[in-house]
Each structure stands twice: as C-alpha cells, then as structure tokens.
Image (spheres, rainbow, N blue to C red):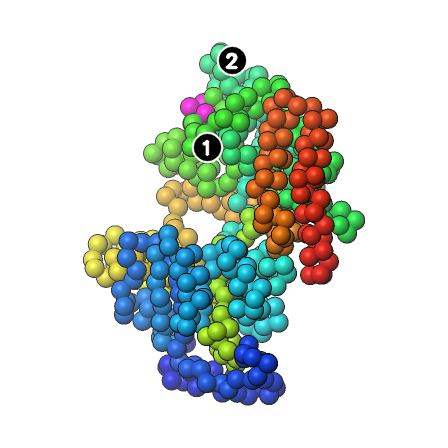
Amino acid sequence: MILSSTLVASTLLLAACGGSGDTASSGGKDGEVAAADFDASTISLMVPFIETTPPEAGNAVLEKMEEYTGKKIDITWVPNPSYADKMNITLASDDIPNIMVIQGKDPGFIKSAENDAFWELSDYLDDYPNLSQANPDVLQSSSVNGKIYGVYRSRDVIRSTAIFRKDWLESLGLEQPTNTEELYEVAKAFTNDDPDGNGVDDTYGIIIPNFAQAFDLFTIWYGAGNGWKDVDGELTPSFKTEEYLEAITFARQMVEEGLINRDFATLASDKWNDPFVSGSGGIILDTYSRANSISSTLTTDTEAGQDFVAFTGNLAGPDGNIYAQPTSGYSGFLAIPKASVKTEEHLRAVLDFIDKTNDADMQVLMNNGIEGINFTVEDGYSVPVEATTAEVEEVNIAIKSYAQMGTNVTEESHIHTSKPASEKAEEAWNLRQELQEKDLAYAVFNPADAYVTETYASKGAQLDQIITDARTQFIAGQIDESGWQSAIELWEKSGGSDLISETNELHKAAN
C-alpha cells in the first residue's frame, strides 16, 4: 500500500513521541537530552555510485522510493573510487547525512565508531519486522568487537563449491564425491584413468592457482575452523589445530601424487579456468559463479554447456560432518551518525526507513527496477525489456546505484533473478539454490571476525605472510612438519601470542 508523504511523516512523529515515554541522550555534552527537533519527512544519505554518472535528480526510481517510504530522499552521490576519502572528510564536517554507506571496517571507521560517532544498534533491530530477520552470524561478523554499528548489506553467505568435468565423471562411470575421501578417489581417477579417452597421460585432478582458496576449503572441511576456532572456550588460530595439519598433509599428498598441479604456487589466478576448459585438469574448488562462467566458456550453446560442468557444494570431512565455508555474508553496511541523528526518536525514524527498504516491493525496485518499464516477470524470473528507450535506460542506470544502499537482510530475498538461458541452465540454478540452502545450515563462521586488535592492525600483514608462506612450502614439500611448527613459533614470537591474548580478551568482553 502506498501512503502519502504527509501521513507517513505524521505517523512516524507520533510514534516517536509516544510509547514508553523513554528519552535518550543526544550524544551531546554531559548527557543532556535533546528535543525531537528533526524533520521526519526527510532522510539524507551518502552513497557511492559505480556508474560514470549518478542517477539524475527526480528519476523514476527515486520517485517511487519516495512514494513508498513517505520520505523526501536526499542522496549525496560519491564516486566509488574516492568514497573512503569523502567519508572521512564528511565525518569531520558539519554536514553529515542521516545514513552513511560504510564500505568496510577500515581504521577510519573503526576509530570513529569507538569514539561514539555512530549509533550502536544491538538493542533496536529486533523492533523492526525486516531488520529483525538479519542473520545473527552475519551481524556478529559485521560488528566491531561485538558492537553493531550498522545494518549490513547482505550478500550470499554460501558461494563455495567443488566443480567437476561432468563428461569425465560420466566417461569413467564415477559419481560426484560427497566427502574428501571420495574427492581424492575422483582426483586420482582423473589423473590416472584417461578420462578424456585419448590414450595419452595428459590429465590431472585438482587445479589450484596462487590464490589459495582451495586450501582454505580443505582446512575448513577437515574441521579446523574458519580462521579461528573455539577450542574449550578459547579462540585459537585455525592453523594451530591438529585438523589444519591433517588438511594440509592431505593436500601435500595429492601434490606428491600429481593429483594437484605442482605449479599451484605460481599459476596465475586469471589462468585458473584454462586447464579445465582445455581438458587437462578436471576439478576446481571455488564458487558457483565460476562454474557458470566455465560452462559459458566451454560452449556458446547454453544447453550443451551444462553437460560439461557438475558441482556438489561443500564436502563432508574425514569425521563425516559437513563444515561449509561461508563468506562474511555482507559487503559494508549502513551506519547512522550521531552528529545528524541526535535522539532515539530520530534514530527510530531512520531505522524505520531502512526497514521499509527491505520490504519486497522496495527490494525489487532498488535491484530489478520498475516492472513493465525495464523488466517483466516470467515464472518468478526477471526478463529485461529489450527496448532502448530513454525511460528504460534511465531505470537501468539508476538501479545500479540505488542497489548500493540496499541491505536486503530478510530471510527470504524478494529480488528476481535473471531468467536462465536454457532448461538445463535452470536445472543447474535450482540445484545451486538447494545446495546453498543445505550448506547454510553447516556454515562455519570465523568467531574472531568482529574483533579488531592493536597487534593485527600493526602486524597483521606480516603475521599472515608467515603462515601463508609456510603453508605453501609445506604443501609443496619444501619443508616438513618440523619446519611447519617452526613457522608457527616464529608467528608467535613476531606478535602472534599477543594477537591470541588480545583476541580472547575481546571475545570474553563481548560474550
């Protein structure tokens, strides 16, 4: 239902002034309480744009957003490459919007948050029908030391999958693997059993580039945790666990046997697909989007392309359990500065606006556009309108920018995905949805993702490099287990022990 601007503004103002009668600190000096002197009919935002130019004032998408939310929406558009600098300049100015897109937990934002520049939202989100559906694990990951300073911009939590040459599986009479032991057997068969039937020993199993995503998958699948692991109430770096050593020993064995390309440390990431497409390697451990990209590369016939690619989702580890690798689940968030939103009443009005942008109609508007103008819906899918009119172009350009301020935190996404190009492509898409939903129940989030320590801020890159180098050397057979343990000791002496202590202090304080 579309309400008039005046009615919605009045309703919000009455709601803000009524209720329990609680008052809130303005964030000013000595905790003085500010009056409800905000303009409830207007909302101001600072948002990055990724196109050449931002949406034009008064465009059709903005008009519908204002009609739906009952707000006059005032957006300061900032070119994406200069957004971080503009954010810091804005926070130091007297002209601060009600909502700021924060693209990541960089030092500038963290310092501002810890200096009480933004509202902490933990006690408020459950009061809103859409915001209350936010994934608690993602909220924790997006927080700063357990404090939630923004509504996260949702992204797929599950993207990882094992990808196989489907035609090789069929030629060898193999089923898709469901666990790491079966993965080994398939990789071995792809290496030794002539899956392409050319009579030449010219194939191998798993393709791994210098971007070591696959090794991260191994360690998670083996139960080592995701970056950190809770061991008897203490957070421990994953690489210090026995499961981690077992996982990289597993990878080392496969390199030794030729089941993984021996040049994994130097194979460029932009060449990752090449052995799969050319028919020399048959397995990639990465994301669903890569599976789709590969099938498109193999053939321009979208129906035939699906015959070459199979995927399984995350695999069970040696203990029989599935430990699925998640993303952080978000890409930045919308934060609310206290300098421009001084009272709890105003805060609740701003959160009500963000909540409305999570309604089904608004998710569709900000991501798909205007039905009947730039897209139509067929069987639940979005189908673009092919006409190249100014009206269609205006909406197509606008949504690429308005999507930057969308959060989409509801349990069910209402955004229409693009209609698959063929029947087999639709089958693959449906399978992907099923596997992602299944793996979501087994997602292993990093329990230390929220914590910002002094040691990691100053030495994190150096500490990470010690372990990355040692892992590569161990898997390549250049160092043995003693060398691996020596690298861990070096990590500890170089600041790692302090990092463990600081991380656990923050973890205990947050829990």
Neighbor class of circle 1 (other Cα within 10 Å; few <14, some 14-19, many 20+) is some
Q: Quadrant of residue 18?
A: bottom right
Residue shown at 28% from the left, 57% from the top? 53
Question: Does the CB distance between marks 1 and 2 fall below 8 Å?
Answer: no
Marks 1/2: CA–CA distance: 25 Å
On the image, numbered disc 1 is attached to which residue? 269
Nearest the eye: 263 or 67: 263
Picture quarter with the N terminus: bottom left
Please provide percent x and percent y for residue 116: 56, 69
Q: Give whichever of discs 1 and 2 has the lower sequence position.
A: 2
Instruction: Classify residue 68 by image quadrant.
Output: bottom left
Q: Is residue 479 magenta?
A: no
Image height check: is 61 above or below 241? Answer: below
Residue at 61% across, 63% down: 147
Query: Which stretch did the figure color magenta?
Result: 275-279
Mark 2: amino acid: Asp
SS at badge 1: helix
Q: In percent of the image, x 41 and y 69: which residue is there?
A: 93
Q: Farthest residue toward the right?
A: 232
Which residue is painted at 51% across and 86% down in the image?
35
Depth check: give the residue in front, 463 or 133: 463
